[in-house]
Amino acid sequence: MGRRTTRSATDARAGQAGPAGPLAQDIHWAGERRTAIGVALLLFTALLALDSCAGRLELTRGALWTGLAVLLFVVLLPPRVSTRPGVLSTRRLVVERSVRTDSLVSVQWSDGVSQRMILRDTDGSRVEIDPAVLVRNPAMWQRVDADTRTSVQRGTLRCGVTALRRLAARIDRETARTVFKVSGLQ
């Protein structure tokens, strides 16, 4: 009898994904989701309370405030970032994007109001993430770092090695700061 193997849906979407391995996710995402829900509910409650106190609460205004609260939730909800060997994925409410981290072509750093890292792979896939997600999730950073080193060794990563070094230095600083704080040396 032959051995039967199946690929998960994430592996199928990521193209020829690497071997299945442990999934590392953003450990702070659930808290950020709760914050987005709380802020949207707070706005909704405040708007309904103001309209009700003013005696102007109607069905259309209630629908408008509901839509506004939902829109705020959608804007505030961060993408859910996860990694597994060779793949980095981001998932929003409707769209999921994946990039092969072991065959990256470029890593670009977008500075501005909110910093972003834009990763592109040889298949043409593109993922945009907040570098703070990798800073606060060591397991994810270790996976991405190992895979980007593979990209450098293969020669596919042509642009962005400097951006990765900057991120690695930032993560090293944060890790050292955390170690000093935990040990009481700071």
Image (cartoon, rainbow, N blue to C red):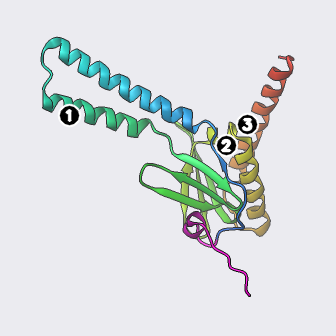
- Kindly tell me whether residue 32 is visible in this rendering: yes
Amino acid at circle 3: Arg
- Which residue lies under the disc numbered 2? 134
Q: Name which residue lies at 74% across and 41% down.
A: 138
Q: Is residue 70 magenta?
A: no
Q: Position of residue 98 (x, y in %)?
A: 56, 60
- Which residue lies under the disc numbered 1? 63
Distance Cα–Cα, label 1 vs label 2: 38 Å
In this orientation, which residue lies closer to the viewer: 160 or 48? 48
The answer to whether residue 25 is left or right of residue 93 is right
- Kindly tell me whether residue 113 is visible in this rendering: no
Residue stretch rendered in magenta on the structure:
1-16
Point out the tag, 3 or 1, that comes first from the N-terminus.
Answer: 1
Q: Is residue 2 magenta?
A: yes
- Which residue lies under the disc numbered 3? 170
> Extreme bottom residue here?
1
- Looking at the rendered image, the disc whose residue lies closer to the viewer, 3 or 2, is 2
Where is the C terminus found, in terms of image quarters?
Answer: top right
- Looking at the rendered image, the disc whose residue lies closer to the viewer, 3 or 1, is 1
In this orientation, which residue lies closer to the viewer: 43 or 181? 43
Magenta part, dominant SS: loop
> Extreme front residue here?
1
The label on residue 23 is none
Q: Name which residue lies at 80% across and 21% down.
A: 181
Q: Residues within 10 Å of mark 3 (few under 14, many from 20)?
A: some
Q: Name which residue lies at 68% across and 53% down.
A: 23
Q: Are marks 3 and 1 in contact (CB under 8 Å)?
A: no
- Looking at the rendered image, the disc whose residue lies closer to the viewer, 1 or 2, is 1
